[in-house]
Amino acid sequence: MQAKEEALKELMEIVGEANFSADRVDLVPYTRDSYSALMRRDIPMPDCVVLPKNTGEVQSVVLVANCYRLHIYPGSFGVNLAGSSLPYGGGIVVDLKRMDRIYEINWETMTGTIEPG
């Protein structure tokens, strides 16, 4: 098995089959934003997208990416206006939208501690 295929298999095991995809139809939305459309730039396909649920899964994804020397592109709910998280070098899109817990709302300081999704 090739190294990239091994990496993809490990990533699927980390987040589960339902939260992993290497299918083109699922990857296309992660290659577009307002800026790239306006500039008519073609963005390469990532190798996969993973949707971790917690920090442990994110850490495991980062370890796999480091081991196989794959790029990581984080994102959350598709808010990407100027190419800041497009997969210019292939690799792994880490979509953080499943990380949706609210830890604390502090009414006194009008702040909240939340996960990125």
Image (cartoon, rainbow, N blue to C red):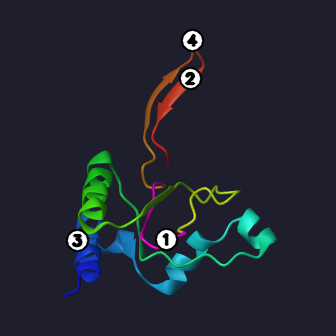
Q: Secondary structure at mark 3?
A: helix
Give the mark nearer the N terminus: 4 vs 3.
3
- Where does label 1 land, which residue? 89
- Give the CA distance from mark 1 to mark 3: 20 Å
Residue at the spot 60% in from the left edge and 72% down from the top edge:
31
Q: Which mark is residue 10?
A: 3
Region in magenta: 88-96
State the residue position of label 2.
111
Q: Which one is in front in this view, the residue at disc 4 or the one at disc 3?
A: 3
Name which residue type carries label 4: Glu
34 inside magenta stretch: no
Residue at the image point whose x is 56% and y is 23% from the top: 111
Residue 115 quadrant:
top left
Instruction: Say whether disc 1 or disc 3 marks the residue closer to the N-terminus.
Output: 3
How many other residues sit within 10 Å of disc 4, few (<14), some (14-19) or many (≥20)?
A: few
Q: Amino acid at mark 3?
A: Glu
Give the Cα distance between marks 2 and 1: 36 Å
Q: For this view, does 115 lie left or right of residue 63? A: right
Mark positioned earlier in the residue sequence (2 or 3)? 3
**Residue 81, position as x, y percentages in the image:** 70, 57
Between marks 2 and 3 in the image, the one whose residue lies nearer the viewer: 3
Q: Earlier in the sequence, mark 2 or mark 1?
A: 1
